Each structure stands twice: as structure tokens, then as C-alpha cells.
Amino acid sequence: GADLVVNLVGILFPSGRQRFDAVHAEGAGRVAAAAAAAGVKALVHISAIGADPQADSGYARSKAAGEAAVRKAYPDAIILRPSIVFGAEDEFFNRFAKMALVSPVLPLIGGGTTRFQPVYVGDVAEAVTLAADRARDDGDTAGKTYELGGPRIYSFRELMVLLLSEIGRRRLLIGWPF
């Protein structure tokens, strides 16, 4: 009896049977096929900024494969590609904050120059709601892909400096190659 499906299942790191392709590609395709079979009016699929079948990252390649699987099963799906999502229980900032509580150094992955445009979880939730409502009302979001980012771009180094300021810690920041 549902008229909307939102698929936001994803993993940041493979572990055990939870592999990128299984979760991001195969799982997303199954959700989309089930939504199409059930006749739901709108499907919103959460992917990731940087999803690209040619990416160096297995994560980004699997997200692109998931988008393709979703489009094949449910062509009118709305795909949202958020940047790093932050909020009370996020997996990115909280991981580094926990690290900063026990370690005297924080790694600057890739030297700290990689750029990010973090987006607040509440804004992502609002985008899901708006896209779904518009798809059900007039269909103008159907089949479209939207990239979601916050108002500012930061280097990885800047994010770690901001994080340390927020948690009241001083740590040595050391460049760490990919």
C-alpha cells in the first residue's frame, strides 16, 4: 500500500559479507525492482557524490553501478548524490573525533588537500522529502539526478582543524598517502 520508497542503504567500508557491490549495486537494483513491481509512485535512491563507473575507488564505482541498476529497474527513480553527510551520528566526523580522543595525531588522508562540501543530514532529509513530494504531485523530479552539497567547500585539513576546534582538542596533523 505504500506509494513511496526511499533507499538509503549504504556502507562506507566493506566488512564480512557486506561488500560494496552487494550493497550498493545488487541491493539497490533489488529495491528498485521491488518498488516497480509494487507499483509505487516514486522511488528516491540515495547514492553519493562522485559516483562514477570509471572511478579509482571501489566505493564510487559500486555507487555508479547501483545507479545504473536502479535506472534499469525503475527509470523514473530520483537519484540524490549527497557529499559527506554530517550530523549527530555521522560516520565521518565522529570517526575522526573518536580518533582524536585517543591519539596524539590525526592522519591527513591524501595529504589533506582533498576537497569536500559537507551537507547537513537535515538538509538531505528535506531534499528527499521535496523530491518525493514533487514526483508524486507533478512528476517534474522523476528520472532526475541531483547532487547535494553544503554551502562551503573545505579541504580535508580544514575539516580536521574545524573538528578539533569543535571538540576542544589539539592534535598533530600528519599527511598520510592514499
Image: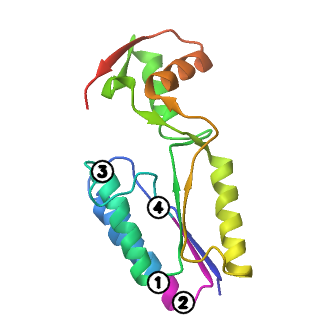
The circle drawn on residue 14 is: 3
- Going from the N terminus, do you reach mark 4 or mark 1 first? 4
- Is residue 18 visible from the viewing direction of this image? no
Comparing 155 with 11, the one in front is 155
**Residue 109 at x, y percent in the picture:** 34, 28
- Asked if marks 2 and 1 touch (Cβ < 8 Å), the reply is yes
- Going from the N terminus, do you reach mark 2 or mark 4 first? 4
Based on the picture, tell me whether residue 42 belongs to the magenta stretch.
yes
Amino acid type, mark 2: Ala
Instruction: Using the rendered view, name the quadrant where residue 130 is placed.
Output: bottom right
The Cα–Cα distance between marks 3 and 4, rounded to whole angstroms, is 13 Å
Task: Sort mark 4 into few (<14), some (14-19) or many (20+) by Cα contacts within 10 Å.
Answer: few
* Residue at the image point whose x is 70% and y is 57% from the top: 126
* Residue at the image point whose x is 59% and y is 77% from the top: 142
Amino acid type, mark 1: Ala
- Going from the N terminus, do you reach mark 3 or mark 2 first? 3
In this rendering, is residue 22 above or below 30? above
Residue marked by disc 4: 9
Comparing 123 with 105, the one in front is 123
The circle drawn on residue 38 is: 2
- Going from the N terminus, do you reach mark 3 or mark 4 first? 4
The Cα–Cα distance between marks 4 and 1, rounded to whole angstroms, is 15 Å
Start-end of magenta stretch? 34-45
- SS label for mark 1: helix
Residue marked by disc 1: 34
* Residue at the image point whose x is 68% and y is 49% from the top: 122
